[in-house]
């Protein structure tokens, strides 16, 4: 919608600070993902013994990210509110993957 103000955000911070979890929760609360999909992630995470990671899986799509519990590559997601169009980039925090954030 061209009448909505764009809002671009990049979430950066230290590894294990909860960036992907917090951002995934925000995306879910704003309707950026179907609740059915969140429930799938919740079941899959619990089956892997990573029950608290399911919000992060909204953004962390790579199998290696889910297995290791860290963001390796940036993830871009979009959703809208009543007044704004949001674009959020979730960036890796682990020092080995900072280059993925920069490029």
Image (cartoon, helix red, strand yellow):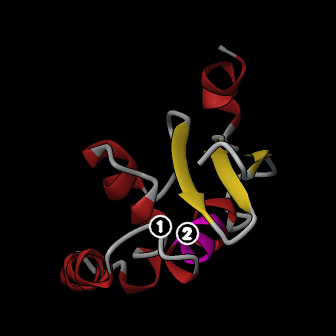
* Residue annotated with mark 2: 27
Question: Which secondary structure dominates the residues rendered in magenta?
Answer: helix
Count every numbered label the image shows and give the total. Answer: 2
Give the mark nearest the N terminus, 1 or 2: 2
Residue 20, located in which quarter of the rendered image? bottom right
Identify the magenta region: 23-27
Q: Is residue 71 visible?
A: no
User: What element does badge 2 sit on?
Assistant: helix
Residue 93: image location, x then y, percent: 70, 44
| Relative to 36, 12 lies left or right | right
- The residue furthest top is 103
Residue 73: image location, x then y, percent: 50, 33
Q: Would residue 99 be counted in the magenta stretch? A: no
Residue found 66% across the figure and 52% down from its top: 85
| Relative to 23, 28 lies left or right | left
Q: Is residue 84 visible?
A: yes
Up-down relation of residue 80 to residue 76 (above or below)? below
Residue found 36% across the figure and 78% down from its top: 50
- Disc sitting over residue 45 in the figure: none
Q: For the C terminus, which image quadrant?
A: top right
Up-down relation of residue 5 to residue 72 (above or below)? below
Residue 51: image location, x then y, percent: 37, 85
User: What element does badge 1 sit on?
Assistant: loop
Alpha carbon distance from label 1 to label 2: 5 Å
Residue found 40% across the figure and 53% down from its top: 68
Nearer the observer, 64 or 3: 3
Residue found 34% across the figure and 49% down from its top: 61
Residue 6, located in which quarter of the rendered image? top right
| Relative to 48, 91 lies left or right | right
Residue 54: image location, x then y, percent: 40, 76
Determine contact: label 1, label 2, CB under 8 Å.
Answer: yes
- Disc sitting over residue 32 in the figure: 1
């Amino acid at each position: 919608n061209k009448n909505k103000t764009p809002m671009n955000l990049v979430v950066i911070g230290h590894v294990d600070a909860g960036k992907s979890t917090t951002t995934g929760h925000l995306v879910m609360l704003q309707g950026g993902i179907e609740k059915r999909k969140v429930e799938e992630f919740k079941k899959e995470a619990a089956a892997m013994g990573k029950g608290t990671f399911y919000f992060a899986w909204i953004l962390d799509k790579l199998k290696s990210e889910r297995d290791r519990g860290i963001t390796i590559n940036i993830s871009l997601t979009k959703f809208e509110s009543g007044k704004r169009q949001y674009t959020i980039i979730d960036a890796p925090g682990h020092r080995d993957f900072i280059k993925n954030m920069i490029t």
